[in-house]
Image: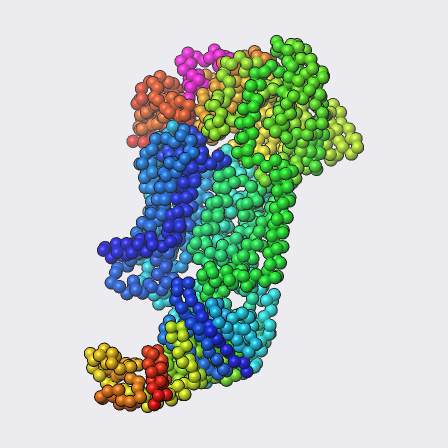
Amino acid sequence: MRNAFTIAGFEVATRLKRISTWVYFAVFFAIAMFWVAAAGGMIKSAAVSFGSGKVWINSPYAIAQTVSFLGMFGLSIIAAIMGRAVQQDFEYRVEHFFFSSPIKKWEYLFGRFAGAIVVLLIILSSISIGGALALSLPGLDPDRIGPMRAVAYIVPYFTVLLPNIIVLGGLFFCLGALTRRMLPVYIGSVLLLIGFLAAQGLLRDMTNKTLASLLDPFGIVATSQLTAYWSISERNTRLLPLEGLLLWNRLLWLGIVALVLGFTTWRFRMAQAGTSGRRRAVAADEGVADVVSVDLRRVAQGKVNSVRLLPRLVWLNFRETVKNVYFGVIALAGVLFLTVTSSTAGDIFGTSTWPVTWQMLELLSGTFDVFMLVIITFYAGELTWREREHRLDQIHDALPIPTWLPFLGKLLALMLVPVVLQALLMLCGLGIQAAKGYHNYEIGLYLHGLFGIELITYWLLCVLAMSVHSLVNQKYMGHFLMIVYFVAISFAGLAGFEHNLYKYGGTPPYIYSDMNGFGHFLLRVRAFQAYWAAAALLLAIAAYLFWVRGTTASWRGRIAIARRRFTPPVAGLSAFGAVAMAGMGAFIFYNTNILNHYLTPDDELTGQADYEKKYKYLDHAPQPKVTAVKVAVDLYPSERQVRMRGQYTLLNKTDKPIDTVHLLFVSGEETQVTKLEFGVPSTLVVDDLQHSLRSYKLATPLAPGESTQLTFDLATGGKGFTNTGAFTAVENNGSFVNGRLLLPSIGYEPNGEITADRERKKFGLPAAERMRDRDDPAGLMENGLSADADFITFEATVSTEVDQFAIAPGYLQKEWTHDGRRYFEYKMDSPILKFFAFQSGRYVVKKDKWNDVAIEVYHQPGHEYNIDRMIAATKSGLDYFTKNFGPYQHKQFRIIEFPRYERFAQSFPNTIPYSEGIGFIARVREDEKDDIDYPYYVTAHELAHQWWGHQIAAANVQGGTMLVETLAQYSALMVMKHKYGEEKMQRFLQYEMDRYLLGRSTEQKKELPLSRVENQDYIHYRKGSVVMYALQDYIGEDNLNRAIRAFLEEHALKGPPYPNTTQLLAHIRAVTPPQYQYAIDDMFETITLYDNRTTEAKAKPLPDGRYEVTLKVVAKKLRADELGKESDVPLADWIDIGVLDSDNKPLFLEKKKIDREAMEFTVIVDKKPARAGIDPFNKLIDRRPKDNTAAVDIG
Amino acid sequence: MSVLEISGLSKTYPNGVQALADVSLTIRPGMFGLLGPNGAGKSTLMRTLATLQDADAGSARMGDVDVLRDKDAVRRSLGYLPQDFGVYPKVSAEQLLDHLARLKGLNDTGVRRDVVATLLRQTNLYDVRKKALGGFSGGMRQRFGIAQALLGDPKLIIVDEPTAGLDPEERVRFHNLLADIGENVIVILSTHIVSDVSDLCAQMAIINKGRVLLTGEPLALTRRLEGRVWQKAIARSDLDALKSRLPVISTRLVSGRTLVNVVGADVPADGFVPVEATLEDVYFAAISGGLDAAVADTQAA
């Protein structure tokens, strides 16, 4: 035992003397400090946060996140230190000193293991220390810092870091000890990373949560699952408990490692390399033979033909790299990983899509990035050090070959590695497609994506890796620097470093769409790749200049050598690289910063803040309202330009004369104004398009009740390319232009203000409410869709290229071709809200009819999969809504597909733009009970908006979106329920509940009750679904529909004033029986959660074949404040008590009054019960839905 | 035939160790022995001549080639066997030799195959040519090393401590190999084993602490000490006393007794008997600084 400690002590002492240990320490210290400082608001442009700006940066949750997240980047040093703990003895050939000493095998191994663990704990303690010290930095926002708790820093070490070090380190240790090489260790780290990524991929399907939590060796998935539903207040106060899946994960992996360590102790041989294994010396040496004299003159030597040698060297290096078991393992693991993650790729509501090629490409390249980085990094190290590690370097370096030859030979060999892997990925992708029965193999697209785009990125990485290894000339430091590079690149954006011009290899993202191909994204990808290729050339030259040949290792010597290598040809090549880089850089800069406005997220916030500061005083200025819109829209898809000419009719509905009209332009400076004229003479008094505003003073004020015209001629479009986002409204195929993109709105726009308190504070703005109070009189006079108009009349003529079809709300009146352009005239026959969009593309259309309503689906050829579902949903929706709510106001319903640059469908009057990414390629299998027909759901939801949104225009106040979105959700749910049954709905609602609970835990400002929702998705959609479904369960669907119909009748197509939630809830209360009135408060007026569970469920068979089930339940009702701080409230609630059979069908289900925390029920059922409990179908909001039921013990 | 002319070569490592101090040597074709203890600077000199390292000052020329600057020209006519080298363990002798031959510019496949075969035969590795190098014994590996050094008709062959660690039989075999290389080529052999030099070399230099102490032909150098080496067997405990009085150049244990060699014109003390001077005496005298005295003595006498 003493020996073990001596060995451990020596290991620690020597490691601590090494500079690299402290470099690691310093790097993690700095990263942690930077991270916390950024989250704390010190770096103005940084956007780091722990889910919500309301979570303190020193909250236990934030600390645990920081520790486990940064700890993950410790993977590389864990591998380096643990892997080398034993392996170094073989590398430095000192193993026999230890093996020949009287120490036991386990002492040697344990000593090394323990020593390395201690060193890692010391190194990684820098994360806590750095994070804690960062709190005392100046410039932190005091509101972001909570009370200091030392224990919060210590706990994550035991729950996260120490187990991770032992688990990961243990595996690496064993790999290094048994194989006596480092390569397997690095392969091991790749495999673990794959485990983590696979676990994350699996999470897309909710039913995989347990598997994913267990599979992830880092415990990150388990931790995030454990804390996912924590409210802000819990995140600020609760310590990370070691329980549930996290505990199981830790136990599982520690168990695995214990086994592996045991195996290692058993297999490890305290013997020198080569003497233990199968390898025997050749020893076939047959004594002194006759020495044959060589005629040295025959050894004719030609000139070294480098050009001929290069391919050979490349091939040899490449073969050496891939022709071993490790590369095979990596490739196999990659294939396995892809197969696993492909099962959930693109899932929405746990339902997959058809594996179209772009999706395979995203899966292949997206998840493979990290993987490729690791592979390239360590093979770069292996290749660079190959001769030196085999001590063949001196012979090799004295050969009469130019220095660039071996360098280039290695670099090109390295670059072949991703080629092989990409080819493998491609086969893999094709295989997955074939296996899923998708046979539209787009080989060209595969080649373009994998080899034409991604491969170039990997090649840039190859050059970087070789250069780092060449320049640093220290293998492990080289690896580490590559990791640092990767971390820096990944998080530069969060820290406010956005431009790809200074992030090596940085290329703006591109989106492939079946409708629009690579679109205009390709040019910018190519431009940046060319720019970085030039940079890579310079890097490669630097790497060549400093390539170590011979035994000179000092910088002085290397610089002297580099000078000599810098011959005129090299200088010429460098100059070419520099010029190319500068030229491409200038071209890019011209596009991203001059042609376009380069705005970082911070700049955008600054703009918003300035807008508010400068113009807030206009907020309540009386303004006219738009009463009619007549517009001619010219779309130029190939040029990505749009022009809108036409007229607003403005009416002064106020009781004051209006002398100045304020026009807001969403596109700001991108708006080209050719004409803006009022019906009366006017002067431009404010021209501030930078802040989206133009104000006109009317020569004669507009008197109350008087109207005038605003004539406009405006244009905008895409110019060159940008660094990040892109103008995608007008595209080669599939343009989708919201009227607001170009047409002005009238008056100050409060939606343009910054909402998050944290950001407001940064810009010196006072805290402000996100929305007007539910009963705010001014708010009630506006509708939420367009504050500057009530119901309007609408006409539009849209022109486009001759082979495209263009669509606007309304009915097609006329179509003609003129001057090689195609024109479509649309007119709306009834008043609509000022909310319209224009689309154009090369569609195929499928037509159908419901009564006298024409149904048309315009879509991309090849996307026929779900058109029938959409039409079916439309028909059943029209059935249900007209029967239960009221008539449909239009005679036509159109769905128009648009490219997946956005992922939503949006309901305009009689017109639904519908993204290709959310339903057109969904693969709903009828025979798969878990699949959710979400194209059906989305269609029904959007159709419902024709009632909720377009007939009911909600007031622009708190709760407004409940009248629009929650009612649309409810409507869609009912249509789905009737088609697919209650059981499917339970699965759907599981996702809704999950998203509600996740949403509230990342709330940036405050959670509100549903009836006061402030346009919060997780409330009006997700909670809305759950609550409305429960409500119809409580008071009955017909009853509820009656209330909704009454509300609709009262307010349809009316306003101002517009309705708010008070009015809907009054109708609902009117139909709700007295005993359920409390539920209306719980569901709509407060944030109420339950913590219900079943502690015991027993059954005994009765003589008549029935069963008597006895169950004990515990119920708890909680009320949360806006940050999720909970308090108990007394129970007097009606909650389902149910007994289910093995198919989850209820044998007994009845609402019982629950008025005590612990209660017991006995019921008799006809068949054999399987599970029983309280609220078995999770109708109520409960963060632990699984414990609501328990398996029935039959005795 | 060109002569290698080294003059004023100096090298100091970043850690302050002066490995070469103003080294000047003239090396003619044939076998040149570079003798010196460990750490004398031999390897530094060899590596510098083999283009693997730069000197701080000085020059080296071979014919019209500036050895220190025109590295490519040197490498084209260089054969180098480093002191410590390894091999790719999984590659066969033939494969690696063939690979190195290509890199030395043996482009013609037929010629290269002949050369590789000839060298493998010459170094007696032909029968194991298909075997992985990882399984080679130290001697075999060393012979492989000389085989690769002979590739490409080198005019300058540098072998750095090639016999270190070889058993006597292997050493003989290795000496035979070296001896066979031919007389028109410069072969620089660095070693700390005196008999390597006395067996093989027509010229030699003794180097210590970066300085050349002595150069010349081994026989001539030995002759200079003729009649000036004296020997006595003494008790081990008397050694220190003796050393303080007399120019002891070497001591050696024979059957438990200590044989002391001393240089001097006359019998240094009682009990000393004259012994025939060997190159070893020259070496030890040079290293211990006793040579100057002895030679000065000779000149005075």
Determine which quarter of the picture holds residue A1173.
top left
* Residue A961 seen in render: yes
**Which residue extends farthest front?**
B300
Figure check: A114 above or below A997: below
Q: Residue at x 38, y 41 (%)?
A: A130
Residue A218: horizontal and vertical position, in percent? 39, 44
Main secondary structure along the magenta-highlighted residues:
helix
Q: Residue at x 62, y 16 (%)?
A: A623
In the displayed structure, A1047 sits above or below A855; it is above
Quadrant assignment, res A935: top right
| Residue A65 left/right relative to A1067 | left
Front in this rendered view, residue A989 or A49: A49
Residue A292, compared with residue A1064, is above or below; it is below
Q: Nearer the viewer, residue A459 or A135?
A: A135
Residue A917 location (% of width, % of height): 58, 35
Where does the image place residue B113, in percent across and percent down from the top left?
55, 76
Color encoding of the figure? rainbow
Find residue A752 and report its horizontal and vertical position in percent. Answer: 56, 25
Q: Residue at horizontal 31%, vertical 28%?
A: A1095
Is A45 on the left-hand or right-hand side of A795? left
Residue A3 sits in quarter: bottom left
| Picture residue at 60% right of the left edge, 27% below the top | A691
Residue A972 showing in the rendered view: no
Residue extent of the magenta highlight: A1063-1087
In the picture, measured across the screen, residue A47 lies left or right of residue A456, that is left
Check the picture and name the quadrant holding the N terminus of chain B: bottom right
Residue A213 lies in magenta, yes or no? Answer: no
